[in-house]
Image (spheres, grey):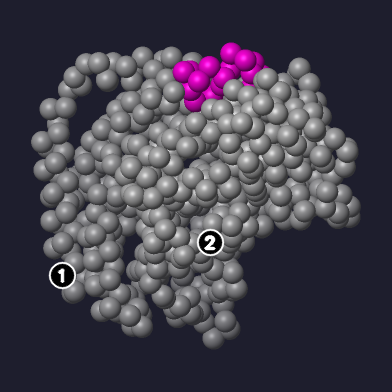
Amino acid sequence: MALLGNIGLPIKFHSRSTNFNSKFFDIRKRTIQKPRQLARTAYTVQKHQVDFDFLPDYQRKLEDVRHLLIESRNKDEDPIGSLIFVDAIQRLGISHHYQDEIEAILEHHYVKTSHRIYRFRSLHDIALSFRLFRQRGYHVSADVFNNFKGENGKFKDEVKQDTKGLLELYEATQVSFVGEDILDEAEEFSKRHLNKRVEANLDDYKWSNNIRMRLRHPVRKSITRVTGTNNFLNHGLRGLNGCGQLLGELANMDIRIGRLIYQKELLQVSKWWKGLGLTDELKLVRNQPIKWYTWSMAILIGGVSLSEQRVQLSKSIAFIYLIDDIFDLYGTLDELAIFTEAVDKWDYESMDMLPNYMKTCYKALLDTTNEIGHTVSEKYGYNPINTLKQTWTSLCKAFLVEAEWFASDHLPKAEDYLANGKVSSGVHVVLVHLFYLLGLGPTNKGSICFDDTSTLISCVAAILRLWDDLGSAKDEHQNGNDGSYMECYMIDHDDLTYKQVREHVMNRIAKEWKYLNKECFHLKHWPFQEACLNLARMVPPMYGYDDNQRLPILEEFVNFVLLNPTENLKEIDF
């Protein structure tokens, strides 16, 4: 019952009947339910020379922005200006081109300001610098915000009127750790007064819309490639020095190039999946290569150099779905136990002990995972296959526990359900495979715990599982028990209403984000850190159903990144 991608399906303890609902992404069916449309587009890209006349201009703009970053680093008379510039680049989703320059700017200004962050006098400036420093692993105490409190210990009245300051304060609270009460207070304060401004129409339409967008999609918890343009309006006056148009044009070109790359990668994934022929024998399993690729595209968004990693990661994600469906829809308990034992042994001889319908899947799993191990070995000089196969064993054991719960018609305690559900989410499989695909390998393994209950993996998995349960409550199309965390929690706490339990789940998700912030603060592998965050960031789009049981944020993401011509960013009011 994997979390990763059970979109449009009840996730837990499905009834193993022929009423299986194979609904795909419940977003625009004309594009998402017909992979051939994207395949044709990708084939055109592959077969014919696409008009890349803008590439010289693109390279020139890349270097122009690089020079501006280097220049801004040395402007000590206006340090906040360079930080605003960095934030703008990150919001537009082009920061992967400038990691060294961004690191140099942040290090330079952190050393200069260090414990003197109060020199940035406005709330906006302090909140922005706090967020940028912290999300990059620089220590800044949340006590800096006490400067905006009065003698009564509450935020001063004038802060309520500072829209830009409130927005940046709210953004800063999204990088909080557990126990930082002042940031909890600041989040509630900023959110409440920003909503009041919107309700009272105190700002013009653009600003009101910007406030709504940033409250729904704070930059820390969003895929900026989608939300960046909408959230960029407040950077129009300071720090950019007329560079808004340059950044917009560069981001526009970067998206166009990225789209062509992603379409070619999707074609590779689709061809690989079709070549396995698994759906010919397993008629009920999900046949959704776009969904699987969307996960890997979002996790590793940006960067031509990560193309191979996105394709390989999509293959691992596909098997999470496939094995999930075998456990949900095909196997008896005895057969599932045998399959789990075979995965633990990880040898081709174990195929003989499996039912015929499991043999093809088992062989394909071994072939694909062994191939990934070989790819890592060829590229980086070590083969992580022993660690990779352990992740699949853990996943199958967690699936088996859920199958046993289903067979006994018994719902576990909520915390027992969640502990097992974090493993059955598949997050452990994804992050471990990704770690090695990024080439981090044995020399870095000691700094990251790969146990499937490690804090880093557990945070992301809990966010996925809990959001999944919230989404499932809006998307229940099948018969059978819905043994979600919410249902288990309501049984454990029968004095609570559905609304109270839902609020508890949202608070639990917020707390897991704080744990994740702390883990990422200490994680010094930037690409892997961003991938972990992107996995968590992609959860609301994947499970954020509206009242019509659609996924509007996901629809926007897929259309924007994979399908439709991009908006012309230079027309935005920078």
Given residues 124 and 303, the one toward you in this image is: 303
Q: Secondary structure at mark 1?
A: loop
**In x, y percent, where is residue 424?**
66, 44
Q: Amino acid at mark 2?
A: Cys
Q: Is residue 329 left or right of residue 220?
A: right
Q: Residue at x 47, y 52 (%)?
A: 533
User: Badge 1 is on which residue?
Assistant: 74
In this view, 89 is above or below 395: below
Q: Secondary structure at mark 2?
A: loop
**In x, y percent, where is residue 282?**
64, 18
In this view, 464 is above or below 543: below
- Residue 556 in sight in this render: no
**In x, y percent, where is residue 342?**
66, 36
Q: Amino acid at mark 1?
A: Asn
Q: Is residue 445 left or right of residue 349?
A: left
Q: Which residues are magenta?
A: 273-289
Marks 2 and 1: CB-CB under 8 Å?
no
Instruction: Tell which residue pokes out farthest to the front in this image.
Output: 349
Q: Earlier in the sequence, mark 2 or mark 1?
A: 1
Q: Residue at x 59, y 26 (%)?
A: 361
Q: Is residue 283 left or right of residue 264?
A: right
Quick check: is 133 in the magenta stretch? no
Quick check: is 281 in the magenta stretch? yes
User: Badge 2 is on which residue?
Assistant: 449
Q: Residue at x 42, y 58 (%)?
A: 442
Say few, some or many: other residues with alpha carbon within 10 Å of mark 2 (under 14 / 14 to 19 / 20 or more): few
